[in-house]
Image (tube, rainbow, N blue to C red):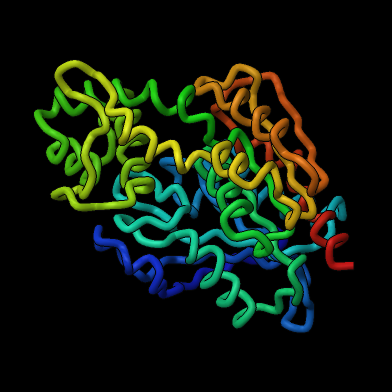
Amino acid sequence: MQGRIRTHHITSTAVARGCFGLPSQRQLCVYEPPGYTEANALPCVVLLPAFGRGHGECFFGQPWKPSPIERLDALIASDAVPPVLACAVDTWTPFGGSQFVDSPIFGDFQQLLADELPAFLRKHWNVRPGAGALALMGASSGGFGVLRMLLDRPGVYAVAAAHAPDGAFDMSLRPLLLRAAQAVRRAGNLETLARRIAARGPEDQLAFEAAIVLACLAAYTSTPSAAWPHFEMPCSLETGQVNEAAWREICSADPLRRLADRGGDVADVKFLYLDAGTEDEFGLNYATEAFYRAMGHGPEVVFEPFAGGHRGLSARYAHSLPLVAQRLWDSGS
C-alpha cells in the first residue's frame, strides 16, 4: 500500500432509532492516497460491502484476492487514476447486512450514509466541497444500497457504481422464501433460527439463504409489531404459500419499482456504472439490465455484462474504479 488507512468511529443517532438495538457506534475506515495532506481537497468514494461481508473486507480483502482499496491504491500509485479519498463504514447487522435502507427494525442506515457520514467526512478530512464530490459504490446488496440511495436521496452522491445489484424481487428474492421456510421448519420456529444465525452465523447453504431473507425482512418491514425479531415470515411454513399482501410490501423496496415510480428519472446522478455476470446465480443480470433499460433521461451510464456468475464481484472494481475516480474529478470541474 502506498497510501494510508485510518480507522475512526462515528456515532449514529440514525442507526440507534431501530428497535433491534444495534450499536450506534460504527467503525469507519478511511483511505488517504499517497501524498495526501489536509491542504489537499479531494473527492471521496464510499464503498458498500456485499451481503455477509463486513466493511473491513472492502479495505483488507481476502487471501490471494486484492480488496477494492488495494486496487484503488495501485491505480493511484501508477497514475492510472487521479487521487481520491475512500471509505467504508460498519453497516453490519446480526443477520449479515442492513441492506443500507432506513428500517424501523434495524435503524436508519440510509440516513447514516446520506447525512451523518458525509458530514463526518467533511469535518475530519478535506473533502472537496460541492455536490459532485462524493461517489457511492457497492456489489450485490451493496449495489442495491447504491441504487436505493440514488432513487431515495437524489443529489447526495453524484457518481455511482453498482455491481450485480439486488432487484427484480419476484425473480431473485421470492424463490428464497421457500428455502427460508425450510430452514425455519428445520430449526423449529423463526425465533430459534434467527437467534442461531445472529449468534454464530449460518451453518450451511440453506441457513445462508435463510439469512438473506431474514435480513431483507428486517430491512423492508415497515410495521415491526411482531415479537422478536420483529417480523413474520411472509409464507406459510406448512404449505409454502406466499402471503401476497406481505409480498407486495417487500416488493415496494425493489429498485425497479422505485425507478418506475420516478418515471425512470435518476437525473441527479452525473455518472452510473452497472454490470453483472451473464450467469448470475440469482438472476441479477436480468435485474440489472432491466434497471438500465428502464432508465430515462439523466446520467451518463455504462452497462457492462461480463461472462461469469455472482461470485468474485470484487474483481469488477478494477473496471469501475478508474471510471468513477475520473468522473468524480470531471464532475467537480
Relative vertical location of residue 268 with respect to residue 130 in this rendering, above or below: above
Quarter the N terminus occupies: bottom right
The number of callouts visible is: 0
Judge from the rendering whether residue 294 lies leftward or rightward of residue 29; answer left or right: right
Give the residue at x 79% y 41%: 301
Residue 174 occupies which quadrant of the picture?
top left
Residue lying farthest to the right in this orientation: 333
Residue in the foreground of this view, choosing between 66 and 314 = 314
Q: Give the left or right position of residue 221, taking residue 132 as reference.
A: left
Q: Taking 28 as reference, is 74 above or below it?
A: above
Question: As rendered, which of 162 and 298 lies closer to the eye?
Answer: 298
The C terminus lies in quadrant: bottom right
Q: Residue 260: x and y, percent? A: 61, 39
**Residue 248, position in %: x, y?**
39, 35
Q: Is residue 233 visible?
A: yes
Q: Is residue 172 above or below residue 54?
A: above
Closer to us: 82 or 232:
232
Q: Give the residue drawn at x 49%, y 65%.
A: 111
Identity of the residue drawn at 9% across and 28% down: 188
Q: How far across and down, in percent of the image, does residue 103 sit?
A: 37, 55
Q: Position of residue 273 (x, y in %)?
A: 74, 42
Residue 323 visible here? no
Left or right, residue 95 beside residue 118? left
Residue found at x 63% / y 53%: 150
